[in-house]
Image (tube, helix red, strand yellow):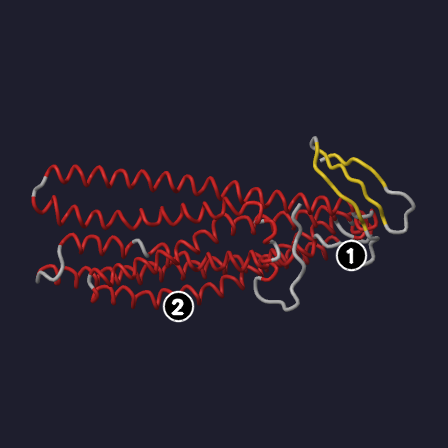
Amino acid sequence: MPAIAAPPARRRPGSDLRRLLPYLRPYRARWIAMVVVAVISLAATVAIPLMTKAVIDGPVRHHDQRGLWVWGIAATAVGISEAVLWFVRRWLVAHATMGVEADIRTDLYARLQLLPMAFHGRWQSGQLLSRIMNDLSTIRRLLSFGLVFLLLNSVQIAVVTVLLLAMYWPLGVVVAASIVPIAGTVLHFERSYTRLSRQAQDQAGQVATHVEESALGLRVVKSFGREDYLFERFDGQATALYDTEVRKVAVSARFWTLLEVIPTLTLIVVLGLGADAAGHGLVSLGTLVAFITLMLSLVWPLSSLGFLLSMTQEAMTAATGSPKSSTPPPTSPTVRGRIRRAAGAWNFATSVSGSRAPRRGRCGG
């Protein structure tokens, strides 16, 4: 069974996330196949505008009905292939990421079940498990969505930019120049959004902790007449969380507004310059249509970089907590033994340091 890797001697950003790599190794064949399928589907996505260029400059321009049917069938086949490849990629990544999450949960549950009862007396196991499940969900979203699209979008931006420069370099330079303010906007708002996301995550944990403490100590609170104090404390924490979430929405609104304005202005410039170039015979009509289609295909990859980077930061934060949660406290006895999953329950044979004989037990799953 895989285990979380030992912490590195020198701590760096993402080092805790890399400690979870042993859980990916059993599924490396699926991950490699997923990357290959994703790259092929990206090639199909880029090929469709190029086929549109060939159709306009070929059969449409020369009134070749037979050639139009041939190119139409080919474009339909490429489109169907792209849809099938997307389905295969999602199927592969779903099985791989769910398997990784299940393995991590198995080890965490095993660790909690093998710990002595004194640990559960000092820690709120329910709250600990709830936080672990939230962290694992964040990591799973990064593995199933964030990392895949971060790779694909980076490759798509590079490939499409090269194609645009090769088609007609003056318009390609305009599009490449528009990428700079978009990238700057993404990085600026990504830092702000990440900071607010972490703050909201901490505040949500404080509110949840306060609610749990109030529920556990309800009789004591009522006996001392401290209901108003606890309500004011809860109201202050909830209001702070609400204000943070509103600031997150404001940052997101400004971010998406700028991401709509910059590509639209670029499209206006490209249409004007492209129409002038087509009128003077510098580019064909099919080249102009393919150019604009490829340029519009860059809007999503560029705009998604912001929340993909934010998702990566959130997963790094979540990965920091998961290894800590799976490590027993220093004061707990040393637990040795093996654990295996069978018939829907945990079967384990352990021995605790200081005890005379090993224990055998069965804990329902």
Report the mark closest to the observer, 2 or 1: 1
Q: Is residue 89 left or right of residue 46?
A: right
Mark 1 Cα-neighbour bin, 10 Å: few <14, some 14–19, many ≥20: few
Residue 54 image point, x, y percent:
17, 48
As drawn, 53 above or below 90: below
Q: Is residue 205 left or right of residue 333?
A: left
Residue 266 image point, x, y percent:
26, 62
Instruction: Compute the Cα span from label 2 to label 1.
Output: 44 Å
What residue appears at the point 49 percent right and 59 percent down from the top-left corner? 310
The answer to whether residue 239 of the structure is visible from this angle is no
What residue appears at the point 73 percent right and 37 percent down from the top-left corner? 346
First of labels 2, 1 by sequence position:
2
Instruction: Check disc 1 and report its element: helix, strand or loop.
Output: loop
Label of residue 329 in the image: 1
Q: Say what amino acid the circle numbered 2 marks.
A: Gly
Q: Is residue 351 left or right of residue 9?
A: right
Instruction: Check disc 2 and report its element: helix, strand or loop.
Output: helix
Name the quadrant of the N terminus.
Answer: top right
What residue appears at the point 52 percent right and 49 percent down from the top-left corner? 141
Residue 179 image point, x, y percent:
33, 65
Task: Give the residue furthest to the front.
Answer: 29
Label of residue 184 in the image: 2
What residue appears at the point 41 percent right and 56 percent down from the top-left corner? 304
The answer to whether residue 273 of the structure is visible from this angle is yes
As drawn, 17 above or below 85: below
Name the quadrant of the C terminus.
Answer: top right
The answer to which of 234 and 138 lies nearer the viewer is: 138
